[in-house]
Amino acid sequence: MNATAAPARPVLGYGTNGFADHPLDAALDVMQAHGYRAVALTLGHPHFDVVADGWLDRAIALRVDLRRRGLRVVVETGGRYVLDPFRKHRPNLLDDDADAAVRVAFLVRAVEVAAVLDAECVSLWAGVRPEGLATDAAWDRLVRRLRPVVEAAREHGVRLGFEPEPGMLVETVADALRLRAALGDPPEFGLTVDLGHCEVVEPDGVAGALRAAGDLLVNVQVDDMLPHAHEHLELGTGSLDLDLAFRTLADLGYAGVAAVELPRHSHAAPRCAEESMARLTDVMERIGR
């Protein structure tokens, strides 16, 4: 009799943006101590500077370390003040040409880093529409600025995981699918879904958003949230039905990274990592995965 194949399940990870007070190697030590098998690496301060000279050597050394540890990796590009010390998340892809070119170059570099790390994807987002810019013009800018990023991903064999963000031009999975279609449905263009965001902006909730993403889903961010505020909360302190989310991922056969994202909790990172793993383990047991 043939043995029944084990069901697909996500690989649990933790985001380095929740470890801003730890050096990267110490953050990875804590994650591994609590059973995580993947890391979501946010480029920029303080863990991986992609702007300074020597980024390639640092990426090669990190690849060696991640392989030694047996950790899978996704690359995140949502650092707050990576490109401008005065403006959070700026410049973005919707800004004027000269500013937007800085963001495009950063995203292309992220693709290059991901290729060296053998990362599963580069997660990215649209940005907030600048004041006075019409919506149609913003969409036109976004499509044009993403084309070289998609081309870089194709050249380096890297998947993109475009993330809808509350308050940004692309804030739902439906918006992201519209964007993908406008780009010609490139195979390199996948989706990132933040489970907490679904509480705030997705009309069909977390299950509907994940099912709409379907086989384009390449990255999952795990956090709780309340419907009225885009604020990442510890698991169990918002309104997210975590069991439903992971049951839906199981139904989809999702076996990629699902990384806890608590960027405002670095002050309690070891505790949050431990308690998040305990909750996620309980969920896996309840849904039989």
Image: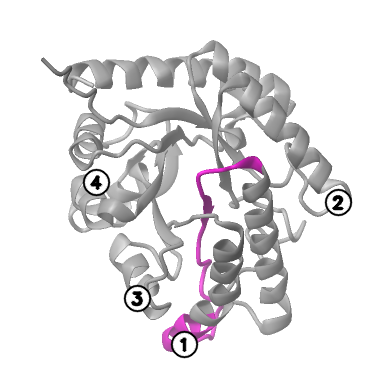
Secondary structure of residue under mark 2: loop
Residue found farthest to the front: 1
**The residue under label 3 is which amino acid type?**
Ala
Q: What residue is rendered at 36% in x and 66% in y?
A: 176
Rendering quarter of residue 269: top right
User: Where does label 2 land, which residue?
Assistant: 52
Q: Nearer the viewer, mark 2 or mark 3?
A: 3
Earlier along the polypeptide chain: callout 2 or callout 1?
2
Using the numbered discs, state the Cα–Cα distance from disc 3 to disc 4 in whole angstroms. 22 Å
Residue drawn at x 26%, y 36% is 239
Is disc 2 surrounded by few (<14), some (14 to 19) or many (20+) residues within 10 Å? Answer: few
Q: Amino acid at mark 4?
A: Val
Q: CB atoms at circles 4 and 1 under 8 Å apart? A: no
- Point out the frontmost of discs 2 and 4: 2
Q: What residue does disc 1 label? A: 134
**Badge 1 vs badge 3, beta-carbon distance below 8 Å:** no
Tag 1 or tag 4, which sits nearer the N-term?
Answer: 1
The answer to whether any part of residue 196 appears in the image is yes
**Within 10 Å of the Cα at label 4, are there few (<14), some (14-19), or many (20+) other Cα atoms?**
many
- For disc 3, the marked residue is 181
Q: Looking at the picture, how far across and down is residue 56, in whole percent? A: 80, 47
In this rendering, which labeled residue sits more in front, label 1 or label 3?
3
User: Is-magenta flag for residue 82?
Assistant: no
Q: Which residues are magenta?
A: 117-141
When the figure is inspected, residue 7 is found, relative to residue 111, above or below; the finding is above
Which residue corresponds to mark 4?
Answer: 206
In the rendered image, is residue 21 in sight? no
In the figure, 145 relative to 268: above or below? below
